[in-house]
Every structure is written in structure tokens, then in C-alpha cells.
């Protein structure tokens, strides 16, 4: 056990000192920083002067609508027998300008909305960058021929494979968890200062970030196992690009359900479940709406759900198969 811990420390130092890994880690910080700044600026509330201008415009629009209502009361469902048409129009047309100042002219910073917007973008970038870190770290050892030198000091290949896998996965998990937590914490503080932070929103966002960290760690592990299998960073990236593009097109061409689309399942992991379109979920025929036997339209959604557990089992099976193949290959194949 002591020897394995020593091997872990060596691999961790090598991982952290690799220049490509350092650059990718810097990108992992820079990308969320840029997205976060843009999100905060895009949702910045208008100034008092801007709000006053908005309210003046809203009042002018309301007055124009009141004038039209008074001249054409029938268009608003006001009968010509009304004693006071102007008063009826006043009651009908709202004088609440909050909608203009809060929703009509700028986006409000709400963490619940950002989870499906900037949060997914940050999670996707982290997964890609950390996958590249995993494959780059491993591929360099094969390209430089240092794997054979490492086996001279530690001939037990299973330990070497496991140590590398733990370092790549653990490093990605810690980095992604810290970055995602910091991202949501900052957005939460800004939302709180703007009085738009609802109860439970920050915890939900943090949980989404932690799930995203798990996805990023799995992506890094996938990059590692494929690179250990193919012994080439270029081959790993090529296979992944081909699978992501051609695989989705092939599934669509042969009519395979979206349930088996890797992108849908990845989104289910990040969002703790998602839905996809399926004809099987659509009604088989027109349905009678309750209370109106002459109405035969149905408003049922043609969507089915992919749960977090379903997506974990599906994508995890690919990672397991790849991991076993990589482990067996490393133990049995000759190392140049």
C-alpha cells in the first residue's frame, strides 16, 4: 500500500507539472470566468434614469391604449351601454409598470434559469477541457516512450494503470468541483444583491455543479482509458469526434430512439434528468377533453423522460467496457 501511495504521488506531480495540463487547467478557470462576467453584465438591472424613461414610455403607451379603448370600446368587450366607457377602460387596462421595468427590457439573473443556460455551457466546456487533459497527459507518456521507463521502477502494470487513472480522474473531479462551486457561489452572491435569489436556488445550482464535476471526471477518465488503449492522443480525439458526430447521425438515420443519444444522456446527468421527443409518448388517437365531449384535441406532451440513473447506467456501461479493454490491453500488450 505504501508503494502504491508513493506511485500516486509521483503520478500526481507529473500530472500537475505537465505544461499542456497546466494550460488546460488555466482554460478551465478562464472560460467560466468569461461566461460568468458576460452573464452578470447581460442581466444587470437598468439604472434609475433608465427605469424612469421606461416608465414614461409605458405610461405613454397606456394612455394611447386608453384613448383607443374609449373610441373603440367594442374591441375590448365593453358594451356601448356602459355608463362610463372611460372608467371601464381604466379598470381593464393595467397601470402596473413592474412588468416593463423587470421583464420587458432586460434579463433577470435567476439561478434556476442559468442552470439550463450558462450552467450547461460551463459544464460542457469543463468536460471537454478535462477530457483533453486526461488524454494529453497519457498520450505524452506513450509518444515519449517514458512508459517503458516507468515500468522499470514499477513492473506491476496494474498498479501503474490504476495510479494514472486515479490521478487523472481525481484531478479532474477536484478541479471541476471547485470551479463549478465558485461559479455558482459568485452568481448566487450577485443574485442575492439584486434580490432575485429564491429560496433553494443556490443549493440546486451547487448540486448541478457537483453533478457536472462528476461528468467532467468521467470524461477525463474516458480520455485516459482510450489513450491507454490506442496509445495515441490523436487516435483518441479522432475516435471521440467520429463517435460524437457520425454516431448521432447514424442513430438518427436508422431510426434509433433519442433515448440512446449520448448527448441526451449527458444532459440528463447534468440536469438530474431530461426529456426527449418520442412518438411512442404521443396519444394513439384524438382524445375527448373532459367537460367538452365535442372537443377532440389532446394537449398531451410527446415526451419521455431520461432519469439520472438511466443515463448513468447507459453511459457508465461504455466507460466500463472501455476501461476493461484498456486495462487488459495494457497488461498484455508489449510496451515499446
Image (spheres, rainbow, N blue to C red):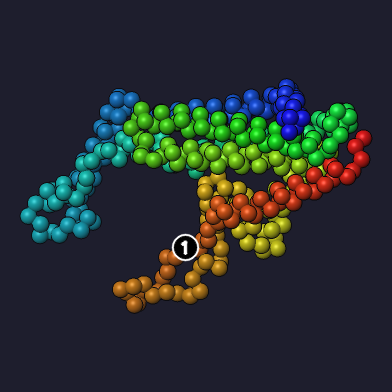
State the residue position of label 1. 301
Q: Is residue 40 visible?
A: yes
Q: Is residue 52 left or right of residue 145?
A: left
Image x and y of residue 121, in percent: 56, 38
Residue plotted at (70% across, 36% down)? 166
Image x and y of residue 95, in percent: 21, 41
Q: Nearer the viewer, residue 74 or 246?
A: 246
User: Looking at the image, how many numbered discs can be counted on the residues?
Assistant: 1
Q: Residue furthest front?
A: 1
Q: Residue furthest left?
A: 83
Image x and y of residue 183, in percent: 50, 31
Q: Is residue 170 above or below residue 67?
A: above
Query: Could you say which quadrant of the image residue 211 lies in?
Result: top right
Q: Nearer the viewer, residue 161 or 196?
A: 161
Query: Could you say which quadrant of the image residue 223 lies in?
Result: top right
Q: Nearer the viewer, residue 70 or 251?
A: 251
Q: Nearer the viewer, residue 214 or 292?
A: 214
Residue plotted at (54% across, 33% down)? 180
Around disc 1, counting alpha carbons within 10 Å, would you say few (fewer than 14), some (14 to 19), or many (20 or more)? few
Image x and y of residue 154, in percent: 84, 31
Q: Is residue 40 left or right of residue 100?
A: right
| Quarter occupied by the N terminus | top right
Q: Is residue 34 above or below residue 300?
A: above
Badge 1 marks a residue whose secondary structure is loop
Residue plotted at (80% across, 48% down)? 325
Q: Is residue 167 left or right of residue 33?
A: right
| Quarter occupied by the C terminus | top right
Q: Is residue 78 above or below residue 327?
A: below
Q: Is residue 105 visible?
A: no
Amino acid at each position: 500500500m505504501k508503494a502504491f501511495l508513493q506511485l500516486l504521488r509521483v503520478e500526481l506531480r507529473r500530472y500537475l507539472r505537465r505544461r499542456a495540463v497546466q494550460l488546460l487547467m488555466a482554460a478551465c478557470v478562464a472560460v467560466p470566468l468569461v461566461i460568468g462576467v458576460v452573464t452578470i453584465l447581460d442581466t444587470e438591472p437598468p439604472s434609475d434614469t433608465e427605469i424612469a424613461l421606461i416608465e414614461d414610455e409605458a405610461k405613454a403607451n397606456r394612455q394611447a391604449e386608453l384613448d383607443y379603448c374609449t373610441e373603440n370600446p367594442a374591441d375590448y368587450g365593453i358594451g356601448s351601454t356602459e355608463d362610463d366607457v372611460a372608467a371601464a377602460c381604466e379598470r381593464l387596462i393595467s397601470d402596473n409598470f413592474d412588468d416593463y421595468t423587470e421583464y420587458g427590457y432586460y434579463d433577470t439573473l435567476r439561478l434556476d434559469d442559468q442552470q439550463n443556460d450558462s450552467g450547461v455551457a460551463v459544464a460542457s466546456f469543463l468536460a471537454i477541457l478535462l477530457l483533453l487533459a486526461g488524454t494529453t497527459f497519457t498520450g505524452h507518456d506513450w509518444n515519449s516512450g517514458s512508459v517503458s521507463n516507468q515500468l522499470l521502477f514499477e513492473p506491476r502494470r496494474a498498479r501503474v494503470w490504476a495510479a494514472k487513472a486515479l490521478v487523472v480522474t481525481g484531478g479532474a473531479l477536484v478541479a471541476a468541483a471547485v470551479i463549478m462551486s465558485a461559479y455558482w457561489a459568485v452568481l448566487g452572491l450577485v443574485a442575492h444583491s439584486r434580490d432575485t435569489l429564491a429560496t433553494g436556488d443556490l443549493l440546486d445550482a451547487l448540486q448541478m455543479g457537483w453533478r457536472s464535476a462528476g461528468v467532467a471526471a468521467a470524461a477525463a477518465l474516458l480520455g485516459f482509458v482510450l489513450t491507454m488503449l490506442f496509445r495515441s492522443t490523436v487516435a483518441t480525439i479522432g475516435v471521440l469526434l467520429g463517435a460524437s458526430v457520425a454516431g448521432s447521425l447514424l442513430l438518427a438515420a436508422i431510426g434509433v430512439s433519442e433515448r440512446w443519444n449520448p448527448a441526451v444522456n449527458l444532459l440528463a446527468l447534468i440536469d438530474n434528468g431530461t426529456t426527449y421527443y418520442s412518438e411512442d409518448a404521443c396519444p394513439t388517437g384524438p382524445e375527448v377533453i373532459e367537460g367538452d365531449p365535442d372537443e377532440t384535441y389532446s394537449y398531451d406532451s410527446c415526451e419521455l423522460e431520461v432519469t439520472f440513473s438511466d443515463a448513468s447506467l447507459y453511459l457508465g456501461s461504455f466507460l466500463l467496457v472501455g476501461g476493461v479493454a484498456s486495462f487488459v490491453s495494457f497488461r498484455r500488450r508489449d510496451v515499446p
